[in-house]
Image (spheres, grey):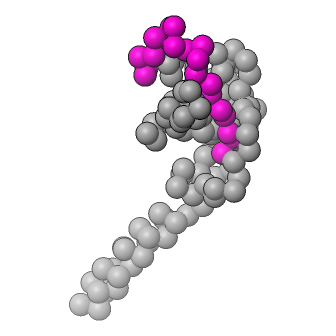
Amino acid sequence: MKTYITTLLFIPLALLLSACASTSANELAPVSKIPPSVAKEGTLANAKLVEDATKALFDGLQIAESERLQIKIIKFVIQQPVGPAGKKAWRETWVLMRAEKAGGQFIVTFREDGAGSANFQFEGLG
């Protein structure tokens, strides 16, 4: 009986500790762990990557070509790159501004693919 109780107490503790374990230097920390004070205006993506990501975002939001030139995107780096060269990953927040009003806020995760390019994924915040 004593072993059984010890096991029951140990398993939840082990799960809790593993959930709190720090991420490795090659992994991005969860978005929920990003302190608000680390955001810095700008982007780490090159011009072609910004162009491709912007087009994908506008296409996904079904924004007409005629409206796209009227939308400004303000970019903030919220997580610095982690991982080895050619496999780095980082996150940015992109805020769409339409007629001086926010038109949506998105977290973009960029991941280099090792072939001289990178992939991106958007998560909408509203």
Q: Residue 15 versus residue 60: which sits nearer the camera? A: 60
**Residue 60, position in %: x, y?**
43, 20
Residue that appears at 51% across and 22% down: 57
The quadrant in which the N terminus is found is bottom left
Q: Residue 78 versus residue 82: which sits nearer the camera? A: 78
**Residue 61, position in %: x, y?**
43, 22
**Residue 64, position in %: x, y?**
46, 11
**Residue 86, position in %: x, y?**
72, 28
How many numbered dots are placed on residues in this image? 0
Extreme residue in the bottom direction: 2
Indicate yes or no whether the magenta region holds residue 70.
yes
Q: Residue 93 versus residue 8: which sits nearer the camera? A: 93
Q: Is residue 111 above or below residue 81?
A: above
Residue 35: tell me if it is visible: yes
**Quadrant location of residue 80?**
top right
Residue that appears at 72% across and 32% down: 43
Q: Is residue 104 above or below residue 48?
A: below
Indicate yes or no whether the magenta region holds residue 102.
no
Taking the image as shown, residue 61 lies to the left or right of residue 107, namely: left
Extreme residue in the left direction: 1
Residue that appears at 58% across and 22% down: 71
The quadrant in which the C terminus is found is top left
Residue 109: tell me if it is visible: no
The magenta segment is 59-82
